[in-house]
Amino acid sequence: MAKTETRTDASERFTDEERDAMKQRNRELKSSKKLTPQDQLAELLAKIESFDETDRPLAERIHRLITEAAPDLAPRLWYGMPAYYKGTKNIVFFQPAAKFKARYSTLGFNDAAALDDGTMWPVAYAITTLTPEDEERITELVRRAAGTA
C-alpha cells in the first residue's frame, strides 16, 4: 500500500516570529548592495534602539564589546538581529529574547567563527544579564572568533 504524504502550508511549519525573520532577511539581502557600511551600522543601531527595556541594554553593551574587541568586523542586520561580519561571513550575532519569545537573549557564533576547540565546542550562549566576568569572556570569544586573538 502506497503511503500518502500530507502537505502542510507555511503557517503550520513556521511560527509568526520565524516567518517575520525570513521576511526581514529577504529585505536585508535585497537592500545590502545598496547600503553603505555607515547605512548598515545605522540600521543595526536603530534595530537595537527598537528593542524592549530588557534586550536593549544587553544589545547595546554587546555591540560595544564586539566593536571594541574586533573593530574589523562589519556590523549589519541578519534576520533582523544585530550581526557582525568578516567579509561576507557572519561571525557573531545577538538574538534578543523577545525575538522568539525566549526567556533569555542569545550571543551566537556561526561556523565561520574561529572557535574550534577539539571535536566539540559551544557556539551559543544564553544571556540574562552581563557581569564584568561575562564581558571579559565575550571579548575573548569575539577576538578568537574574528581571528584577532
Image (cartoon, grey):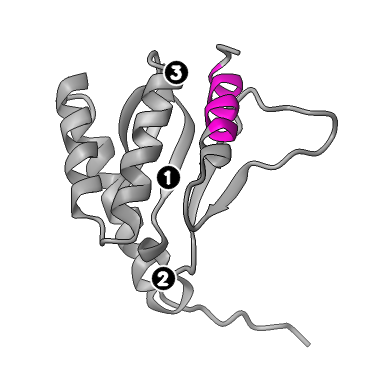
**Residue located beneath label 1 in the image:** 94
Which residues are drawn in magenta?
136-146
Tell me the crowding category of disc 2: few under 14, some 14 to 19, or many 20 or more residues within 10 angstroms, Cα based: few
Residue that appears at 70% across and 42% down = 122
**Residue 118 to residue 87: above or below:** below
Three-letter amino acid code at disc 2? Lys
Instruction: Decide which of 11, 3 is in the foreground and name it.
Output: 11
Q: First in sequence, mark 3 or 2: give its number.
A: 3
Q: Residue at x 29, y 52 (%)?
A: 56
Against 134, is 97 above or below?
below
Q: Is residue 34 above or below residue 7?
A: above
Q: CA distance from mark 1 to mark 3?
A: 15 Å
Against 96, residue 71 (above or below) is above
Provide residue 50's location: percent of width, then percent of height.
Answer: 19, 54
Where residue 72 appears, as percent x and y from the top left, is 39, 13
Residue for badge 2: 101
